Image (tube, rainbow, N blue to C red):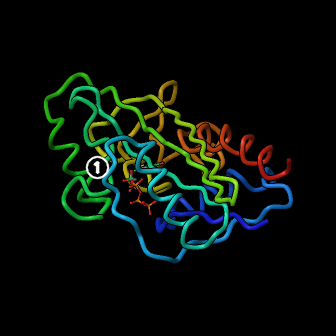
Amino acid sequence: MQIVLATHNAHKVEELQRILGDRLGEHELVAYDGPEPVEDGDTFAANAFIKARAAAEHTGLPAIADDSGIAVDALGGAPGIYSARYAGTRDDGDNLRLLLTNLEGETDRRASFVCAAAFVLPGEGGTVEHVEESRWPGEVLTEAAGVGGFGYDPIFRPEGETRSAAELTADEKNAVSHRAQAFGALIGFVRSTLDA
Ligand code: ITT
């Protein structure tokens, strides 16, 4: 069966193709190119459901969506759900520079990447919905390092690592990241629901 991946972020698509890969069984991920809903939820889970519901309603297919970001302890969890446009644009470089500026002189560098992975299955007997949320703890570096990944990866050092997330290989990141954990948990629910 086709499952719509309700994201317009090409980096997420690439990571999710690798993370879910073989675990999809006979199901196939297809890109969503319909209208983007307004993400006005106040949690990662609420926004993930807004995206998945919009794609499911538009296509009539089961849909999965990712809402994610970086939550910094010393900033009370900011930028959190506002991570994609922290500096007012969608430019990753501007966003991470602003975060470094806002943490200048701060010794508590603790932060986590957070991912909410949502599944929505439309049906005549009612809609099935499920969400899984995971965190990837670490700290914000004082300068960028590495060219892999995307977003805030160059300034995030995962707990237990000496390298930034952007210095990990794609396989290393995808084995442990917030996205890998959330979708690893979600896919079990998706498979048991669709294969029932
Ligand atoms: P969609 O809504 O279309 O999925 P988006 O990029 O707008 O795409 P979000 O609203 O979930 O998605 O924002 C996620 C932002 O959080 C993303 O743009 C990055 O800035 C950051 N982020 C999320 N996961 C990340 C990761 O694995 N590495 C680095 N930064 C990440």
Locate the N terminus by quadrant: bottom right
Left or right of residue 48: residue 191: right
Q: Residue 102: name its quadrant.
A: top left
The residue positioned 75% from the left and 41% from the top of the image is: 188
Q: Residue 69: name its quadrant.
A: top left
Of the four image quadrants, the one with ligand 1 is: bottom left
Q: Which residue is mark 1?
A: 82
Nearer to me, 181 or 3: 3
Q: Is residue 169 above or below residue 110?
A: below
The residue positioned 23% from the left and 29% from the top of the image is: 76
- Three-letter amino acid code at the position of disc 1: Tyr
Q: Position of residue 177 (x, y in %)?
A: 56, 39
The residue positioned 66% from the left and 60% from the top of the image is: 62
Q: Position of residue 163 (x, y in %)?
A: 48, 37
Q: Secondary structure at mark 1?
A: helix
Counting labels gives 1
Ligand 1 within 8 angstroms of badge 1 C-beta: no
Q: Is residue 126 above or below residue 135?
A: below
Q: Position of residue 16 (x, y in %)?
A: 62, 56
The residue positioned 56% from the left and 72% from the top of the image is: 32
Nearer to me, 76 or 189: 189
Nearer to me, 144 or 54: 54
Crowd class of label 1 (few under 14; some 14 to 19; many from 20; radius 10 Å): some
